[in-house]
Image (spheres, rainbow, N blue to C red):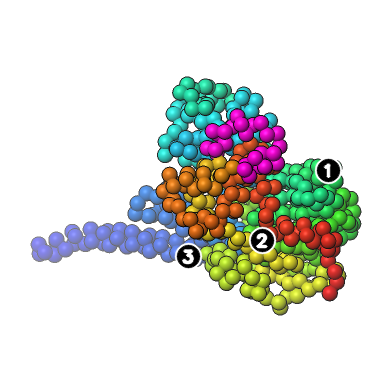
Amino acid sequence: MKSSQKYYLLLPVVILLTLVIGFILGNYFSSNSLSRKFFLNSGNKIDVILDVVDDQYVDTVNMKQLVEDAIPKLINELDPHSTYIPARDLETVNEELEGHFSGIGVQFIRMNDTITVVNVIRGGPSEKVGLQSGDRIVTINDSLFVGPEITEEKIMKTLRGPSGSKVNVGIRRNNSKDLQTYEITRGDVPVNTVDVAYEVEKGIGLIKINKFGKSTYQEFLNALGMLTQSGCQSFILDLRQNPGGLMDAAVNIINEFLPGKRLIVYTKGKSFPRTDAYSNGTGACQTQQLIVLMDEMSASASEIVAGAIQDNDRGLIIGRRSFGKGLVQSQVTLGDGSALRLTIARYYTPSGRCIQKQYEMGKGEEYEQDLINRFYHGEFDSADSIKQSTDNMYKTLLGRPVYGGGGIMPDIFIPRDTAGITSYYSLLLQNGVFNEFAFNYTDKNRKKLSKYKTYTELWNYLKTQSLVESIVQYAETKGIRRRPNLIARSSKTIDNLTQAYIVRNMFGDNGFYPIYLHRDPAVLKATEIIRNGEAYPQPK
């Protein structure tokens, strides 16, 4: 009787517990089932995954950093030229194309863990307050700024800043122990995209462009005007090592060389209908001889220029096969200040060819290996080693065959210049010996070198000096042992580059490039062709 009473007393409790447990388990499985269903049916799994990680992951996660790290991996699954730019890097990246940045206007190197001014940019903030080449920047805003921990990135971030803001620098000049303090008001500093424009020989002008930015076309017009005034009637456009940039700048420059109503380039993509760019007939150099220099690092907008000139039979392309980038990117700025550069279209040269080299989605490393493979296959040394498909053949206006895919093939191949290039020379280059020696030499002899009023006068003087032996001795102090046989083989090359660096310290790039390029095989070949009046393509 007692057990029966106990049973009836416990029965409601058991039933209640069963109901509670069932409710809990039901909610658990129902919740997980709904979660899985939402996950599987959702149009944006990434958001769902992030929410689940944020809500349920075993440890606390910095979700913002997780997203920041994940985005590049996502974009890397697309083509090799779509890219994500974090907010911290966007300003620097944009400066390359904007044509200016805000800073104090000096070029510097780090020597013995000290910021040393190599060049003061004309008209810039530093020149206005009296900074000079050779000054050592020891303090910035009253803080000591020397030592191995002071990186170039840290220097630039400290010296740059909003236009109109002020920065105090402590300068040691001529090895004086006393510091001179200057308050500099930051301002716009031009980023030149035209390295140099000069007369190679009588009547032949060379213009070297390092990238295509917002200021490039105006810089180009200034260079073209200067050369034309000096009597140049034929031109060499040096686009070697030029990675490209803004398409509009390239189109405007091509327009200067083409007669009216000639197709320059067209673009089209899945969401972007075909858009054509034509010349308008206002170009200043529609009939003059023209040669474009290219190499394996000439890409994008550089290839647009070369392709338009080649397909319209307006001039000759000299050098080596170009990079092969035929994709167009559009930059989308995101809410946090970062940006996405997304491939939205392909561009095509006037004959209809797309020169984009082959790639597989998500295999950027293999794509980047292409240039190395081309080097090992001997393509930079012999035209016979070039591996380019001839399946996609097109015709220029005169009927010359050209090919799509894999870059622009030059009309005249020029192998890389290996004359005087030895392991000893390469060691000097890799260790920055040329730059350091040239600066020290300039610094010690600045008063004497300042007497020469033109770069040619200074160059003629330097030819009389024993610079090769001097730089070899300097290299020994850096732990690079003397190699007599290799030095003898590289003697002319070492001497030429040393002279060019010293002249650059006094006259900038306007003095550097005429010396650096005066023995350049591509420039010499271009000059010869123009001299003989052979720069106009002939039908085949």
* Residue annotated with mark 2: 295
Instruction: Name the residue: 46% across, 32% down.
Output: 145
In terms of secondary structure, where does tag 3 sit?
Answer: helix
Disc 3 residue type? Lys
Instruction: Name the residue: 60% across, 58% down.
Output: 82
Q: Is residue 261 above or below residue 191?
A: below
The Cα atoms of the two marked residues, 2 and 3, are separated by: 55 Å
Which quadrant would the C terminus be assigned to in this image?
Answer: bottom right
Instruction: Name the residue: 61% across, 31% down.
Output: 448
Q: Is residue 177 above or below residue 211?
A: above
Question: Which of the numbered marks, if any, corresponds to residue 432?
Answer: none
Where is residue 126 drawn, in percent x and y? 61, 28
Nearer-N-terminus badge (3/1)? 3
* Residue annotated with mark 3: 37
> Is residue 345 at least partly visible in the picture?
no
Tell me whether the residue at label 2 lies in contact with that at label 3, contact meaning CB atoms closer than 8 angstroms: no
Q: Residues within 10 Å of mark 3 (few under 14, many from 20)?
A: few
Question: Which of the numbered marks, if any, corresponds to residue 230?
Answer: 1
Span highlighted in magenta in the image: 439-464
